[in-house]
Amino acid sequence: MFEAVGLFVLGLVLLALGGDSIVKGSAGLAQRLSVSPFVAGLLLVAFGTSLPELAVNARAVFTGNQALALGNAVGSNIVNVGLTLGAAALAAPLLVRWRALAPLLLCLMLATVAVMGMGWDGAITRIEGVLLLVAFVAVLAACIGRSRKEKPELQDAIAGFVRTGTDLWLNLLRFAIAIALLYFGARWVVQTAPVIGLALGMAPLVSGLLVVAIGTALPEVAAAIAAARRGQGDMVAGHVIGSSVFNLLVVLGGMAVVRDVPVPASFVRFELPAALVFAAMLYPMLRGDLRVSRAEGGILLAAFVAWVAFELFLVHAG
């Protein structure tokens, strides 16, 4: 058990380092290839933080542990809103000027409802996986188009996310290091999470939902708190919402394209509705005064703690 915990923590560290390395490498190559800094920054802000989850789920699917991958994909969305955004807003109120995030959040809620419908018959099929990937392309195009209408200062802030060294050798080295880190990090997390979950009385699905989703989010929580204190509310909210959309449409959709994803009935009744509720809680905060206050952050964090307690109750009650 202690060895499993040690490898799990080491895997999380490698995933965090690998995710950071691949984001920097992508930013550098985008600048070198003359990709619009605004578009490149938007993609990295919104979807870059999901790369560790993508690596974990790819490994889980490859090893036949789809339950762990499913739990992680949906659990990460709950963790994103409840823990990451809640903790960041509690540390410092978030001013969100990025108006395209409200429609993106609406897309997240619609995607969650769609996944619930797809899983109603007990599985997300390959065709449904393709539909999720196509939906992501449409959402991405709409998000880029709408974000181009944002105020110049916000566009500059988003574009600033990709400013880094542009040397070809440096960024290729970053990619090579990232691939190695993500490979071993994902391998050790997928290998040890079921062991830890079993010791806590959890099935693989719940291990992915709680152990892996919370574990992989911890570096993001620390980064979000630091960004909130620097007044970068747009970046925090963009990371949270964009990553959640990516998890459902690309990570889960990609899993289904490789192989049909079994979805337990209990997951459709409890976990997916919980993800929908967390997203819905955030919607009036972004549509109202464009601020996520400390009080609202506290509500999100309290709701997250209540959800974890409920999941643990179900584990031990079962």
Image (cartoon, helix red, strand yellow):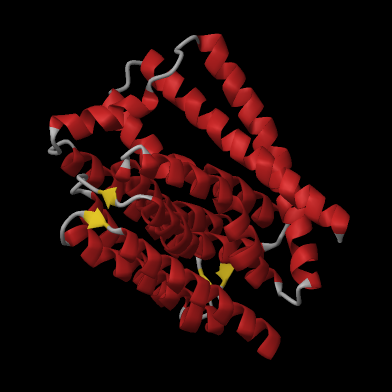
Residue 75, image x, y percentages:
53, 65
Residue 180 seen in the figure: yes
Q: Could you tell me which residue is drawn at 55 percent across and 81 percent down?
A: 310
The extreme bottom residue here reads: 317
User: How many labels, in total?
Assistant: 0
Q: Could you tell me which residue is drawn at 53 percent across and 60 percent down?
A: 73
Can you say whether 213 is above or below 185 in the image?
A: below
Left/right placement of residue 103 relative to residue 42 reads left
Q: Nearer the viewer, residue 167 or 305?
A: 305
Q: Which of 31 and 200 is in front in this view?
A: 200
Q: Nearer the viewer, residue 134 or 60?
A: 60
Residue 217, image x, y percentages:
55, 52
Left/right placement of residue 39 relative to residue 301 reads left
Can you say whether 238 is above or below 263 in the image?
A: above
Residue 29, image x, y percentages:
44, 19
Image quarter in which the C terminus is found: bottom right
Image quarter in which the N terminus is found: bottom right
Left/right placement of residue 79 relative to residue 276 reads right
Q: Could you tell me which residue is drawn at 36 percent across and 55 percent down?
A: 89
Residue 253, image x, y percentages:
47, 57
Q: Which of 212 and 296 is in front in this view?
A: 296
Q: Could you tell me which residue is drawn at 42 percent across and 70 percent down?
A: 275
Can you say whether 252 is above or below 110 in the image?
A: above
Residue 318 seen in the figure: no
